[in-house]
């Protein structure tokens, strides 16, 4: 391969890396933020369901059910 073609190929690879590395970092940062947020959302859905079950079974308000749930979690280090 002639020197000019090697230089052009090397420059093309360097250009791709220059674009690809920051893009990869951006995607990785988004994953780092997205995973905990999705986990928190999933947990929130479970908490809301538990509040509803407690409210219905104990015949109390949803706010009081949350207090019961929170007290149980605190007393059991959950």
Image (cartoon, helix red, strand yellow):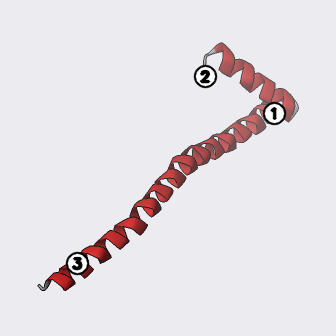
Q: How far apart are labels 1 and 2 at the CA level? A: 20 Å
> Which residue, as the protein is rendered here, is positioned at the far right?
61
**Earlier residue among tags 3 and 1:** 3
Label number found at residue 78? 2
- The residue under the point 78% across, 29% down is 66
Element on which disc 2 rests: loop
Q: Could you say which disc has been placed on residue 55 in the image? A: 1
Where's residue 60, x and y in %? 87, 29
Residue appearing at x 73%, y 40% in the figure: 48
Which residue is at a point 15% across and 82% down the rendered structure image?
A: 3
Asked which secondary structure carries label 3, the reply is helix
Q: Which tag, 3 or 2, sits closer to the chain's start?
A: 3
Q: Tag 1's secondary structure?
A: helix
Q: Is residue 35 above or below residue 62?
A: below
Residue 71, how many percent across, how many down? 73, 19
Quadrant location of residue 13? bottom left
For the C terminus, give its image quadrant.
top right
Q: CA distance from mark 3 to mark 2?
A: 61 Å
Residue 40 position by quadrant: top right
Choose between 31 and 12: the one closer to the eye. 12
| Contact between labelled residues 1 and 3, with CB atoms less than 8 Å apart | no
| Residue ID for mark 3 | 7
Is residue 16 rendered to the left or right of residue 27? left
Q: Is residue 51 left or right of residue 21?
A: right
């Amino acid at each position: 391969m002639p020197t000019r073609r090697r230089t052009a190929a090397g420059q093309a690879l360097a250009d791709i890396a220059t674009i690809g590395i920051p893009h990869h970092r951006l995607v990785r940062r988004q994953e780092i933020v997205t995973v905990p947020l999705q986990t928190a959302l999933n947990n929130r859905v479970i908490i809301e369901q538990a509040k509803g079950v407690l409210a219905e079974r104990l015949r109390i308000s949803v706010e009081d059910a949350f207090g019961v749930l929170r007290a149980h979690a605190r007393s059991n280090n959950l």
